[in-house]
Amino acid sequence: MKRFLIGLIFSITAPASSLAQSAQAVPGEFIVKYKSTSSSSSVAKVRTKLAMKSASVQKAFAGMGMYHISLKAQAGEAQNLEDIKNDPDVEFVEPNYIFTKVDDASSSNNAQLYVYQSSYTYNEVLTNNIAQNDNLYHQAPINVGVTSTWSQITPVSPTNKVVVAVVDTGLDKNHTFFKSVANGGSGALWVNTREYNGTAGVDDDQNGYVDDVSGWNFISNTNNFLDDDDHGTHVAGIIAGVAQNMFARPLQESPIQIMPLKFLDANGSGTTAAAINAIYYAVNNGAKVINNSWGGPNYSRSLHEALAYAYDQQVLIVTAAGNYHTNNDSSDYPMYPANYDVPSNIAVASASQYDTLSNFSNYGANLVHVASPGERIFSTLPGDVYGYMDGTSMAAPFVAGMAAMALREAPNMTGYQLKQAVMNSVDVRSSYNGLVSTSGRINANALIVDAKNAVATVSSYQPEYKAQLRGVASDSGGSAGGCGLVSTAIHNGPGNGQGPTPMAGVMVGLMALPLAVWFVLRRRDPKHQRKHERFRMSSQIRVMVGDKELVGSMNTISQGGLSFNTEEALEKGGIITMRITSPDGHEMIEVQGQVVWSEQNQAYGVQFANARQGTLAMIQQWTQNLVKS
Ligand SMILES: [Ca+2]
Ligand SMILES: [Ca+2]
């Protein structure tokens, strides 16, 4: 059951062939947490204990009581592991699971072409008139008030910059925008001054990382965090772009400093340990906000502990809600890290330019908090260019950026208070009722005004919090029992073993839509317009007319519309909402349209109205192997 659901969630960005992935972990590697009250709470004692079991410590997360360990491959490995697990001082042991990005399957040719065709140099940005101040993010109809904050913020000084960690695929630090002010950039890249002024090859600030001048790569364990994807650079640009017009020249000095922490490689692979490492590094090296534009359906206790640690250190955690148009509140479709109930974790859905939920965006009346622009967002890309991306990946960094700006105005705010402030400053819209907990879409200007007013009155506060699985019961109870290492996590759930599957089949998705989307957009360009190819497709369609729901069967589908049969009578000219199941039955899209023709045998033709690019991209994927009509 669960495996099917994983497939369903990720199949939006992956073809069917990549769905059947089994749980993967780094052989012989585990994450162990010791009880904080135990006699083993000192790192030296733990190291000694682990050494007796032939386990070497790859990384001690002393502040969290957690250890990333490696067991030597030898005859006694299983017994040693069992002994560690059974140590009464041990709280839990979890495998070091491998994250697998699954939206990369379609990216080989299309992505290359996309970058070539749709990225803009600075000069092209100017000639294409993209850099209109008030339309910078192409969200003009929903004014999130970013540009109107610029005249109100406290001027930049060396002491009032806020560090935002971007846990992602890295950053192109050679992009003009991220260069130092002296080199014509905004200085938006974090600088670790002791390493910057220190000695090459020496860990000048003694934080365990040699020459971590402005970030770290937790895959290669080097200071080379260059972005071999596009994702991290785009996300970072959105965050820093909240503070200024990135196309103004000369660039202003950035009040935000991006700390790039690379934990996914070019293939989208990373490990739980790398993610924890990145979060631990962020917290311990001065980040006040951590942006996480990635996620997957599996619970990890050790990742949960890392976020709880960030919370304890008053750090705001911003997470993307996901792009699967599923309900994060549902036990069948959980999304982590968005769903961790850490009180400074704000989960962000995507808003369309019509101030409605993007039709790819996840939602959740409890677990998703705010909506934020996530369609056709323009930002930095590697290679000193700029381009568009869609996704909750793009929605989250707006929140991270504006939260950082609010923190400059009211530096006493804890991550907990900052989250409340963001939630309290939204514009409530009925279109978000029941979809996000605030029923609102962010308003950066309102947040800054609130933060400035709060300076005198706000004193730091946050409630106590302990990481513990509180998930709702699901039908997947014993399904993770095979690995036998996560019993503590399972047993912490309600109902004696009922709870979200702890990392059963670990996948992670970057929350940006596949680049194929822009292919479809290009085809919709009037220059390329021609009659849409129709394909025969037989699957179920559900049609909402007013408060009535009809079930029908699909006949044909194209980029422009579809036809179907239903026994009910439909009015020609009427606007209907359709939920269409994919040919393989694994996906569903929702799209609106107008009934444009009907036949006596109760066949209807519908023309799509305002179909989102994500929807059209999915239809394109669905129809690749279908017969033309
Ligand atoms: Ca260092
Ligand atoms: Ca150094």
Image (tube, rainbow, N blue to C red):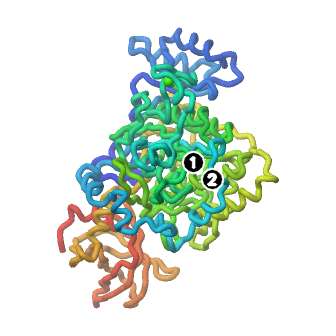
Q: Is residue 134 left or right of residue 316?
A: left
Can you tell me whether the CB of the residue at mark 2 lies under 8 Å from the nearest atom of ligand 1? no
Front residue of 18/348: it is 348
Residue lying at 60% horizontally and 52% vertically, measured from the top left: 346
Front residue of 402/512: it is 402
Mark 2 surroundings: few (<14), some (14-19) or many (≥20) residues within 10 A = many
Q: Is residue 249 left or right of residue 313?
A: left
Mark 1 surroundings: few (<14), some (14-19) or many (≥20) residues within 10 A = many
Query: Residue 588, how many percent across, how many down?
Result: 39, 64
Badges 2 and 1: C-beta atoms under 8 Å apart? yes
Secondary structure type for disc 2: helix
Distance, label 2 to label 1, CA atoms, is 8 Å
* Amino acid type assigned to the residue bearing label 2 in the image: Met
Query: Residue 531, how many percent across, how many down?
Result: 21, 78
Q: Is residue 432 above or below residue 242?
A: below
Instruction: Give the number of the disc on residue 256.
Output: 1
Q: Is residue 526 visible?
A: yes
Return the disc, 2 or 1, that comes first in the chain's sequence: 1
Residue denoted by label 2: 405
Secondary structure type for disc 1: strand
Q: Is residue 257 above or below residue 623?
A: above
Q: Is residue 291 above or below residue 110?
A: above
Q: Is residue 243 left or right of residue 219?
A: right
